[in-house]
Amino acid sequence: MLDIKFIRENADVVKQALANRNAEADIDGLLELDHLRRAVITEAEGLKTERNAASKAIGGLMKEGKKDEAEASKENVRIIGDRIAVLDEQVRELDEKISNIILYIPNLPSATTPVGSSEEDNPVLRSFGEKKEFSFEVKPHWDICEELKLVDFERGAKITGSGFPVYTGQGAKLQRSLISFMLDLHTTEHGYTEVEPPFVCNADSMTGTGQLPKFSEDMYYTPSDELYLIPTAEVPVTNLYREEIIDVEKPVKLTAYTPCFRREAGAAGRDTRGLLRLHQFDKVEMVNFVTPEQSAAQHEILIAEAEKVLQLLGLHYRVIELCTADLGFSAAKCYDIELWAPGVERWLEVSSVSNFGDYQARRARIRCRDENGKPQFVHTLNGSGVALPRLVVALIESYQNADGTVTLPEVLRPYMGGLEKLG
RNA sequence: GGAGGGGUGGCAGAGUGGCUGAAUGCACCGGUCUUGAAAACCGGAGAGCCGCAAGGUUCCGGGGGUUCGAAUCCCUCCCCCUCCGCCA
């Protein structure tokens, strides 16, 4: 959430930033409500000052036994109280109206985010490795999955629905191995603490990280308990410290494996084949809490940590930066990592590494102490480290052999019981 | 799910209608003392909102109510603990 004070003082900056994002928001209406709210609060607080003084005086009169005077004053205070009740109700209504606007306003792009009008304008920053040459006709992953019985799409669709694959045999073990490999890397090499959070969250948590109120249609929801299935570990892990003041003198770095659940409401019919777009998938996530001063530098560290996973797996990838038009709702700055998948001949997004500035911290009220001991909002960052299905796609398509087997990268073999090839 | 107990500042823990934003202890910060440190002593120190400021206002799990006035009384929800039941 944006700081209302900042909006008040920099309305034109905010409007321009939102325009760069192709986002709509009624800033003038918001400021009008804000102005009214402050006026009503000022009046209400003035009356409260009066009431508090009068009530205190009544206490004194009662003690002195001046009953009549006390009774007269009571009547007076009651009238003030009625007026206060009306004003307080107005404030409550204004707060709600303001929330209904401000919670729908996305974060402002950082000053270094390139301005663009579509994903076409996302610059490629760098790449690692190169496209492999194959001496045979490469297969898309769905054929490999079927031939090696790594994934059972049909039965997943039967027991749940499309987009819920069943991993089987070596496919299931590969999932588990990749998760362990990535968690081990982040905890032993990158200084992360592993956490295993709940996979469902309440509305306050979803609001804290920015999924609610705007994106409720994208999530699975259990009405009887009013809980949402998490679309990413970012939600429970970031909300660990909701409404807390924490010590971030050193960056707080948490990593978690969780399944992720997404309804993909706006993407029905796209990428229906294979593992490219699923309703449930596994992901290892990294979440950082830092001071405002640290955040830009920490963003670079975080992207490097995510890249390390792919470097160790020997996969060809590129890093792009999202331009203003393609930036996620809560992000101020974001890098995406895309893996080359030779079977489907596409770049696949496997990681999104974002700096949220204080946007999430303000929504979730996560704070730290500044050098003077005063509370200030932390900065939050997170990055996939990385998402599994598309990683599996790129992995098995890249390492497929002419005989139908798939060679496993060295780093995974210990996790696969020494296995060198799938198949 | 049933019965009982409880949720107060970073922590522990007083407080049952007004002088309590909150005693006391611990932890924390500053100072005195000391060669330095410890101890002792003195002092400081919660958060949000409104306000240029002075200052005001709100907050004792959340919400609602009673009252001139609520941490304190009433209702309701949530959470934690103990016991019983069920159970991975």
Image: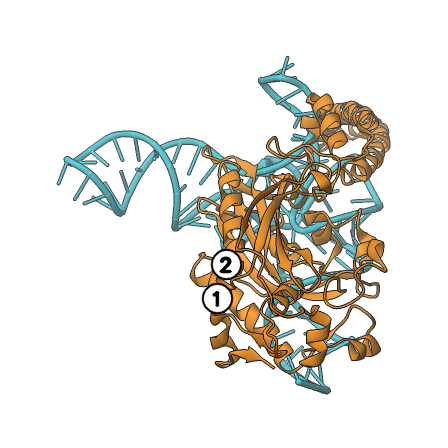
Chain colours: A orange, B cyan
Visible residue check, residue A354:
no
State the image quarter where residue A161 is shown: bottom right
Task: Write down the residue under mark 2.
Answer: A311
Q: Is B82 displayed left or right of A157 in the figure? A: left
Q: Amino acid at mark 1?
A: Asp
Distance of label 2 from label 1 (alpha carbons): 15 Å
Judging depth in this view, the residue of A249 and A13 nearest the camera is A13
Q: Residue at x 81, y 53 (%)?
A: A216
Q: Which mark is residue A184?
A: 1
Q: Residue furthest front?
A: A135
Judging depth in this view, the residue of A374 and A173 nearest the camera is A173
Q: Position of residue A29 (x, y in %)?
A: 84, 27
Q: Dot 2: what SS?
A: helix
Instruction: Classify the position of the N terminus of chain A by image quarter.
Output: top right
Q: Position of residue A83 (x, y in %)?
A: 85, 28
Q: Dot 1: what SS?
A: helix
Q: Position of residue A270 (x, y in %)?
A: 82, 58
